[in-house]
Amino acid sequence: MLKVSNVTYSYKNDQPVLKNVSFTLRDGIAFLLGENGSGKTTLLKVITSILTSEGTLSINGIDSRSDEYKSLISYLPQEFDIYPELKIVDILRFVALLKKVDKSKVNLEVRKAAKRVNIEDILDKTFKKCSCGMKRRVGIATALIGNPQMVVMDEPTAGIDPKERIAFYKTIRECFEGKNVLISTHILDDIEILADNVVMLARGEVTYCGSYKEFRNSLNGRLFQIESKVGEPPVALSGCRVLSSEKQGTVVKYRVVGDAGIMPECAVPIDPATEDIWLYYQGGKDDVGQAG
Amino acid sequence: MRLIRLNLKVIFSSIILYLFYAFVVLFFLFFFIMLDQTKIINYVIFLDNLAYLEIAIFILAFCLAVYFAQKGYILEEICFAPRTSCLLYRNFALLIASSCICAVPLIYIIISSIMEGTMLYFNCLAIIYFIFRWLSLLLVSETLGFLIGTLRKNTYVYLLAAPFSIIFSHLNEYFLFLFFKEDKLIAISNLLSLQEPLIHGVDIDYSGARVDLLFAMKCVFTLIFTLLIVVVTIIVAQKRFAFNTVIALCSCLIVLPVLGRLYVSIFPKVYSYEDKLYITDDRSAGYMILSYEGDIRLSEYSDFKCIVTVKKGIGDLTLRLDETLKIHELTLEGRKIKYIRSGDFIVIPENEIPNMNSFSVGLLYGGRVQYRSDVDSINIYTSWFSSALPPNFAFIPIVDGDLSEKDYNFSVKCANALISNLTVEAGDVYTVSGRSNTFCLFCGFLTQFEKEGIIFYRAKYNKATDYWVEYQSALTRYSFDPYTCEFENLSTKPRKVFMIYYLYGIFGYPVVFDDYIMLNYGYPS
């Protein structure tokens, strides 16, 4: 279990990137969502203690300031451009050595990790000769070494095609069963394939932390569509939030969140898409009371 | 250790390193072919003269360091290795990998030493000297390149290799002259340059590789300078001023100027030939030296114990002893007396001199003699393995204007072969004795041969000079009289010829002393 309490971080003397961030993540695969610049990578670097922040972090009760903490985490950065001239077996060996795996167990650990991600046959290939998908697998293998309790991945599927992405998540599901995995992404399809939990970050603050099921259902029965003609006076809405609007010919369609009781008669209930939920937790448009 | 192993693996897996090796070897071969090997005196002098190869190595090593500094640290990052360690170990691994180029001079020395038949001692000195010199070059260029590559990730930083190679080579004198005056300029230029000192000077062929105090001082200076760059790199990596790094930074900044000052202070001084070697005013006032005896230990800092028997003259007794030699004790007839030391002169007041026909002056003194001529050749000096103490140079007390013959009897301890105008008997210590009006001592990789009744002294390892031809050629030129400073025809056949000496202000003319010649062979008449 990862516990983050009151984490604040700022680069040099700039505005804080993370503002008093607190959440708790139980075991399972969690997604860290947020727009570009929302502070996702910074939060991941704070969790992995690459960056030192104000506040406290712990994994299974072990504080981030202890030496043991780092041995509990594996980190897969966004750009996994590891030394291209090295053979995969050497990369894995050095990862094991640097993670302070007992020297006598290094080869065993490397073979075990390679077997789990199915790269045993290409261990003697140099990294630069691997396909994109293979490189991702090597990344997962490095994360597997050292038997971590928590795995942190920064946008691991950025730039890979859907087929490879599905295969990648399948591997993650298989390899990190029962572990705490935190993956940052802004690809919404990823969440539906894999997420157990979701952490939503907006402008350096956590706007949602909980199960994906609750996240997915959080707008059920509360999302409506209101149509109005272009140029007509707006429909007054009190206690509602407009998530988005779309102009279609002479008609503007608004997607509005609010309780059914306060909606005007013209409001039609609709099924929320993941984008609606995203917009809702990102703050959507400013809290407005009118549409049109 | 793990980070070093990783970085060594990364560096040795990179084609860039092998290109670096290839370029160094190619440049070396280029200079080897371009320089006429028949004119190369010995392999030490050949390696010493590879100034432009050293500049090329500096540029290549700098670029190599920039390349590896700009490579990412993803593997280390995912293992949470501290950034400072990542930088330092990569820099260190790079130094280890690139230092393999030292095999080039090493292999050349081994092959040349077999071909030239040089002795082990000579070869060991050469190996120490050139390995340290090439390592110094790599240390500075790579730590500097690494720092620059860490600070800036763009490709333009490679261009900085050019200005830095100028600063750290003999080319620096072309801009240092804007800041320093003549004598300091040469010393500071040589301090910053990672090449041989006084690069434009003529190499002395009997000294072997110059493993001396100046070289040792330069090595220490380079090491501390490198440490300073490393500390700055740590600060860059940590992005803050940690207490320990600030202490290290301050220590380096304090030590460097001190070392620099020491280097400048021991740097060979320029001398005036008239003052040190040739014409001097007559200061004898009737005093004449009858004999010398004592012990001499020749080294970088030499020690002398000398008892001089002097025939009484009138007034104060003025002895000349070179200013670089400090007097520890001076006695007259066994008792300590008051005297005045001013520059090269020791003045013993008349009232201290006993009323005797002759009396003895005992002196204990020592110091480091290092003088260079105006062509930047160090030709009066003493080092651990070789010394050049020419005739009339006051390494023993002399009386200016006293040209009489004296008896000499010295025990001389030195680390190499010794020759003199007097009779030299080898043993545990050399005994140098005889009667002459001058006295010279040379120590180094020297040998002698005899032809037509003349003893020739020469450098042991000189494959380029035909000494007999040079001697014959010298006979066709005017000779130089060191007392009158006039040129004249060589009238009598000398007993000994010292062909070990390069320029010392007489433009290559043979200098004739009583029964021997100092011959500046190899210089155009």
Image (cartoon, coloured by chain):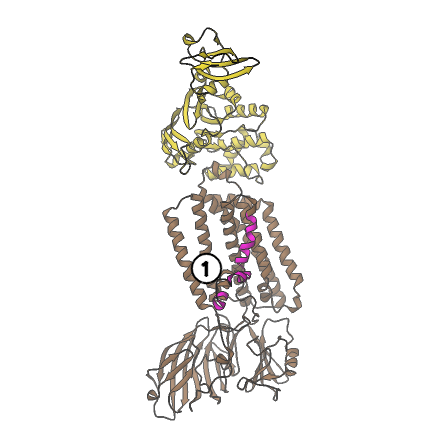
Chain colours: A yellow, B brown
Is B122 part of what is drawn in magenta? no
Q: In front: B278, or A121?
A: B278
Is B162 part of what is drawn in magenta? yes
From the image, which quarter does the C terminus of chain B lie in? bottom right
Q: Is residue B247 placed above or below B484 in the rendered structure?
A: above
Residue B394: give x, y in percent of width and height: 46, 80
Residue B30: give x, y in percent of width and height: 65, 58
Residue B255: give x, y in percent of width and height: 40, 58
Q: In front: B341, or B216?
A: B341
Residue of label 1: B221
Q: Can see residue B13?
A: yes
Label 1 neighbour load within 10 Å: few <14, some 14-19, many 20+: many
For the stretch drawn in magenta, what is the main secondary structure?
helix
Name the residue at 57% across, 28% down. A160
Name the residue at 61% across, 71% down. B462
Q: Which chain's residue wears label 1?
A: B
Residue extent of the magenta highlight = B157-185
Query: Toward which corner of the image does residue A100 lie, by quadrant?
Result: top left
Q: Secondary structure at mark 1?
A: helix
Left or right, residue A70 beside residue B44: left
Name the residue at 42% across, 33% down. A46
